[in-house]
Amino acid sequence: MREEVRDIERLQHILEAMNVLVKYQTQHTLEEAVADPVVYFGLVKHVEIIGEAVYKLTLEYRASHSGVNWDDIERMRHVLVHGYYKIRPEQLWETIAVDIPQLKPIIEQYISEME
């Protein structure tokens, strides 16, 4: 039986993963992260978690909160999981350094609206 999807919990998972990404991005350079496979694949995994949590959001929620490009986030997760051999570290780093900080306050707002 498929688990019941709870949008608030998925948003909280997204925020938790974002917090980890922001923390480690500020502690490492791209070169340092790439040189340390534990750090690098930890970053990859947290971006994957964000994409999986987005995938688990209800379609109704995603449609009613169209200010976020949910489909792009979900597609990135698919590339990281299934196209792992095509990951470009610079693109991943840009996502973490630029996109995550822009998206984080929106996710925080969505969570606060639901609490």
Image: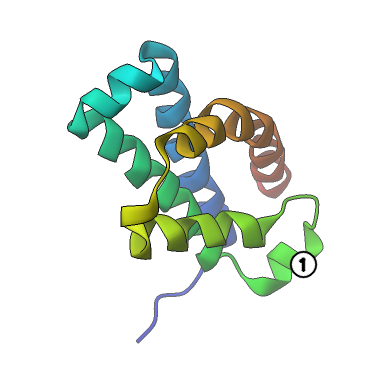
Instruction: Name which residue lies at 27% across and 40% down.
Output: 41
- Report x, y in % for residue 97: 54, 25
Instruction: Name which residue lies at 29% across and 33% down.
Output: 40
Q: Residues within 10 Å of mark 1 (few under 14, many from 20)?
A: few
- Report x, y in % for residue 93: 47, 31
Q: Nearer the viewer, residue 7 or 39?
A: 39
Residue lying at the far bottom of the rendered structure? 1
**Image label count:** 1
Q: Mark 1 belongs to which amino acid?
A: Ala
Please tell me whether residue 58 is drawn above or below residue 97 in the rendered image.
below
Colour scheme used in the picture? rainbow
- Report x, y in % for residue 50: 48, 49
Instruction: Name which residue lies at 66% across and 37% down.
Output: 103
Image quadrant in which the N terminus is located: bottom left
Image quadrant in which the C terminus is located: top right
Instruction: Name which residue lies at 46% across and 47% down.
Output: 13
Residue 41 relative to residue 115: left or right? left
Q: Nearer the viewer, residue 73 or 4?
A: 73
Residue 89 relative to residue 36: left or right? right
Residue under pointer 1: 63
Residue 35 placement: quadrant: top left
Residue 104 placement: quadrant: top right
Secondary structure under the numbered disc 1 in the rendered image = helix
